[in-house]
Amino acid sequence: MKQLEAFRRDDYDTAYAFASAEIRQMFDRAAFERMVRGGYPEIARSTFALIADTRATPDGHLHVRVRIRGANGNSVEALYDMVSEPGGWRINGVVTKPDPGLA
């Protein structure tokens, strides 16, 4: 949720800090911003977010399901893959699908 708050402020430096080491190896800071803005507009500019479910996986990850409404009027269900790293849990990826039930 703190990453979503950072995106709302256009604070991509802070948002990038919530990404896992693996994601930071794949994307430098500028590429990360382009990827989020271009591929995840509802996440880049959310107006509402609700954690719907959190589950531990056998490999030690956490999967966090978040219902998100974007400033563009569209809603998505986002499944975040979280990994434990020194300093806390980091986002290792996200998959979204439309969430027409979020009014």
Image (tube, rainbow, N blue to C red):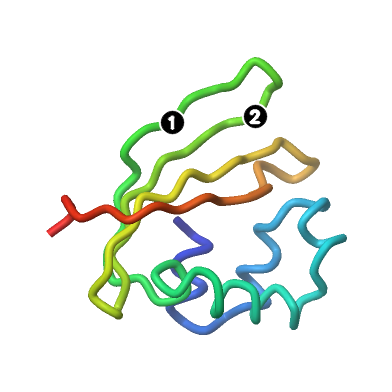
Q: Up-down: is 92 above or below 32?
A: above
- For label 2, the SS is loop
Of residues 25 and 99, which is closer to you in this image? 99
Q: Report the side of 51 relative to 12 (left or right).
A: left
Name the quadrant of the N terminus: bottom left
Q: Report the side of 9 relative to 25 (left or right).
A: left
Of residues 98 and 37, which is closer to you in this image? 98
* Numbered label attached to residue 70: none
Q: Few, some or many C-alpha atoms within 10 Å of disc 2 (few <14, some 14-19, many ≥20)?
A: some
Q: Report the side of 90 relative to 78 (left or right).
A: right
Give the amino acid type for the residue marked by disc 2 in the picture: His
Of residues 4 and 27, which is closer to you in this image? 27
Task: Classify residue 58 by image quadrant.
Answer: top right
Query: Which residue is painted at 65% across and 79% down in the image?
Result: 33
Residue 53 pos. (x, y %): 36, 33
- For label 1, the SS is strand
Query: Which residue is painted at 63% across and 50% down in the image?
Result: 93
Query: Which residue is painted at 65% across and 58% down in the image?
Result: 18
Going from the N terminus, do you reach mark 1 or mark 2 first?
1
Kindly identify which residue carries mark 1: 54
* Numbered label attached to residue 61: 2
Name the quadrant of the C terminus: bottom left
Give the amino acid type for the residue marked by disc 1 in the picture: Thr
Distance from the alpha carbon under mark 1 to that under mark 2? 10 Å
